[in-house]
Amino acid sequence: MEYEIMYLLSEKDTARLAEIKAEIDAIVKTAGGVKKGSEIDFTQKLKYEIKHNWTGIYVVSRFTLEDKDTRDEAGSGDTVAEISRQINLHKSVLRYIVVSAEGLPTLEEFQQTRLKSTTEGKKSLKEKGEKIDGKLEKVLKI
């Protein structure tokens, strides 16, 4: 079964990003997961402060695990819960989520959507700024 993991790191960890990604990948691999394809990382301003951070680095990746029935025969228990527990103990991870990737867009589609919404947001801010400038000119009679 395919899963997606998204975790948030402090912007202060930019220098250690590759190292932290490798540690998270090792947690998944130790639990029997196999990384699938590439991963996406991006920096974004947070909507609220998390552990004294207003900006964070999001990392999104996909991995596969054997079906639960197959794992239970081997006696490995709930692998996703174990991955979550290990990531929760990682000091650099501020927040995380592990979900089934069934029905989710591919990481490439996610990246395209994210980039499109970012550029559209910048355009709308520019348009709003131009409208405000026009109104200010009218009011101030410049």
Image (tube, helix red, strand yellow):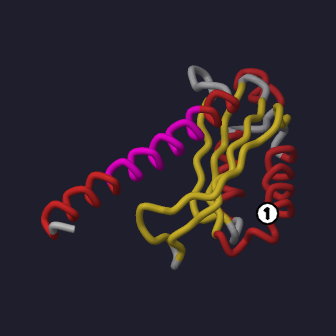
Q: Is residue 16 left or right of residue 105?
A: right
Query: Residue at 72% across / 21% down in the picture?
Result: 69
* 69 falls in the magenta region: no
Indicate the amino acid at tag 1: Leu
- Asked if residue 95 is positioned above or below residue 4 in the image, the reply reads below
Find out whether residue 117 is within the magenta segment.
yes
In the image, residue 4 above or below residue 82 = above
Quadrant that contains the C terminus: bottom left
Total numbered badges shown on the rendered structure: 1
From the viewer's perspective, tell me whether residue 91 is left or right of residue 105.
right
Residue occupying the far front of the picture: 142
**In x, y percent, where is residue 26?**
86, 52
At horizontal 85% and vertical 60% (from top left) the residue drawn is 18
Closer-to-camera residue (65/35): 35
Q: Residue at x 59, y 64 (%)?
A: 56
Of residue 1 and residue 51, the one placed in the foreground of this image is 51
Q: Residue at x 59, y 36 (%)?
A: 99
Mark 1 Cα-neighbour bin, 10 Å: few <14, some 14–19, many ≥20: some
Q: Which residues are magenta?
A: 113-128
Circle 1 is placed at which residue position? 17
Q: Secondary structure at mark 1?
A: helix
Residue 64 in percent (x, y) is at 77, 30
Q: Specify the quadrant that holds the N terminus.
A: top right
Image location (x, y in percent) of residue 107: 68, 32
Q: Position of residue 88 (x, y in %)?
A: 64, 60
| Left or right: 60, with 36 as reference point | left
Q: Picture quarter containing residue 130?
A: bottom left
Taken as a whole, is the magenta stretch helix, strand or loop?
helix
